Image: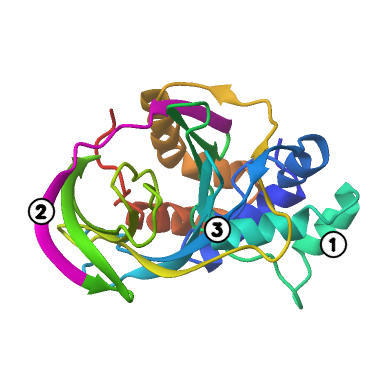
Amino acid sequence: MYNFMNKIVLVRYIGFLFLSVISIPSFAQTIFHFPKENIELVEHIVTYSLEFQEDSMHQNFKRQEDMLLFIGSTVSRFVSYNYFIGDSMARTATSQEDFQRIASDRSNPLPIVRFRYEIFKNYPKDKQTFIDSVLGSGKFKFEEDIGLFKWELLNETAIISGFKAQKATTDFGGRTWVAWFSTEIPYNDGPYKFNGLPGLIVKIYDTRLHYSFEFVSIKKPGYDLFIGFPEFDYIECSKKEYFKAKDAMRDNIISHAKTAGLNSEVQQKVAKLMERRNNPIELSRK
């Protein structure tokens, strides 16, 4: 069923080059009926700047989004900065009507979110959990082993973002990645799913320079902030099944636009904009 929030989704897709803003049937439902399970307190918040090439055919057109890594004593959470802010704003609502007021407030709009996934590392133990919403299907969840990466440590060093860093490489998701990690920040973690080096990853990029994460800052939270896992009626699946749902959403985007009440001209714009989003971070669909 498409409601007020669904129309906001597709209108924002058009106005902001089909950004993934609110891609579940009702974001309000997530807030009012599905609280978060507090796992543990956040010890440090790491901010990364992500530069990425959304369209594989347009090398000179890149986008930027800040990403956050919340590090606890045993668990970490990786999420888009805009998603974190938008979720925090939306959770101040006390009713469906209040949420709609927040969502439509032009003076203080919900931020535009390109990436709605969340990654929880070492949750459960020795696993990482990936959750994401797929328009028209629901909210998906799958687990992977945390030790996904076979790193090759190199002797090359450099100063990256003010820290002495060492170079390492790995193959993942159909790309070859170059990472710089610093033992001066003693966390074996990093952006996205990357982890397992003897220090925090302060920069990582694929060799085609389609995706590049770079360290911006690390700080302690100024208040008690928890790594919270959303309690939700997830579609539990394999990674392959998640990719299949994402691909089906792309193939049926005109149908979603039509169901939302958008006219044929707008439906075609939606389809063309979706075609430009053809360069995911993980090219391998396994």
Rendered image: mark on residue 132: none
Nearer the observer, 250 or 230: 230
Q: Amino acid at mark 3?
A: His
Q: In this figure, which residue is indicated by the disc labeled 1? A: 101
Distance from label 1 to label 2 (Cα)? 53 Å
Q: Amino acid at mark 1?
A: Arg
Q: Is 13 contained in the magenta span?
A: no
Determine the secondary structure under disc 2.
strand
Give whichever of discs 3 and 2 has the lower sequence position: 3
Quadrant into which the N terminus falls: top right
Rendered image: mark on residue 154: 2
Nearer the observer, 192 or 10: 192
Reply above or below: 184 against 140.
below
Question: Which residues, given as a range, are shown in magenta?
Answer: 137-158
Report the side of 179 relative to 186 (left or right).
Answer: left
Q: Amino acid at mark 2?
A: Leu
Q: Residue at x 52, y 62 (%)?
A: 14
Give whichever of discs 1 and 2 has the lower sequence position: 1
Distance from label 3 to label 2 (Cα)? 28 Å
Residue 265 pos. (x, y %): 51, 59
Determine the secondary structure under disc 3.
strand
Of labels 1 and 3, the one closer to you: 3
Give whichever of discs 1 and 3 has the lower sequence position: 3
